[in-house]
Amino acid sequence: MKLSTFALYAVAAAALAVSAAALPTVAKEMTVEVGGAPMYPSKNIIQNAVNSKDHTTLVAAVKAAGLVDTLQGPGPFTVFAPTNDAFAKLPAGTVDTLLKPENKDALVGVLTYHVVPGRYTAKDIMAMIKKDGGKTTLKTVEGEDLTFEAKDGALWVWDSKGDAAKITIKNVMQSNGVIHVIDTVLMHG
């Protein structure tokens, strides 16, 4: 009887030790849900984005543009990620046209216009907006600027054509950067 009680305590102690060892890992993985899937800070932009049901168009475009390896790289990158609904707001046929192999350069231009080198959280962008008197700009990988403004209790991104996208989910941390989900596709000049 004493041996079985001892064995039970040993098993319980081992289980607690394993649970305690796993706790720091779980605590570090503070996830944000995007498109019905948790986004893990220990994974890179591509590893997380492929799991979001709201970003299947973006993922298909990134693959067609040959940007998977880049966005899996060390970065850091700040990605303003349009949802499927954002792509659906484009004029009919735009996405299909961009996904054709002969339009790869144009697709790369559109996608890299949504990426800024560096890791910029919403707090960082807000501090820049305040410092710059109400608006600030960041240069994209594509080469043109995006303009940022806080308005109506939200953070907005303006493209070079004057159209705005609202950041709907901010600070989705990645191992190689940060993603901010936006509701409109940004178009460069």
Image (spheres, helix red, strand yellow):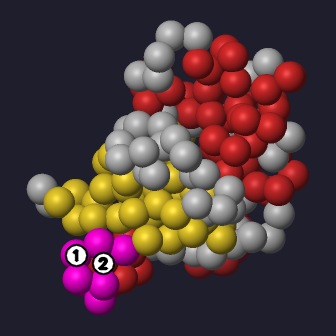
Is the C-beta separation of discs 2 and 1 under 8 Å? Answer: yes
Q: Indicate which disc, 2 or 1, sits on the residue closer to the N terminus.
A: 2
Point out the stretch of residues depicted in magenta: 130-136
Label 2 Cα crowd, 10 Å radius (few <14 / some 14-19 / many 20+): some
The residue depicted at 83 percent of the width and 56 percent of the height is 70
The dot on residue 134 is 1
Q: Position of residue 27 (x, y in %)?
A: 52, 73
Tell me the kind of residue under disc 2: Ile
The residue depicted at 79 percent of the width and 26 percent of the height is 103
- Is residue 41 something one can see in this rendering? no
Disc 1 is placed on an element classified as: loop
Q: Relative to 51, does residue 96 appear above or below in the rendering? A: above
Tell me the kind of residue under disc 1: Gly
Q: Which is more toward the observer, 36 or 2?
A: 36
**Distance between the alpha carbons at the discs numbered 2 and 1:** 5 Å
Q: Which is more toward the observer, 126 or 175?
A: 126
Which residue is tagged 2? Answer: 129
The residue depicted at 47 percent of the width and 60 percent of the height is 146
Residue extending farthest top = 92
> Is residue 131 one of those drawn in magenta?
yes
> Is residue 52 one of those drawn in magenta?
no
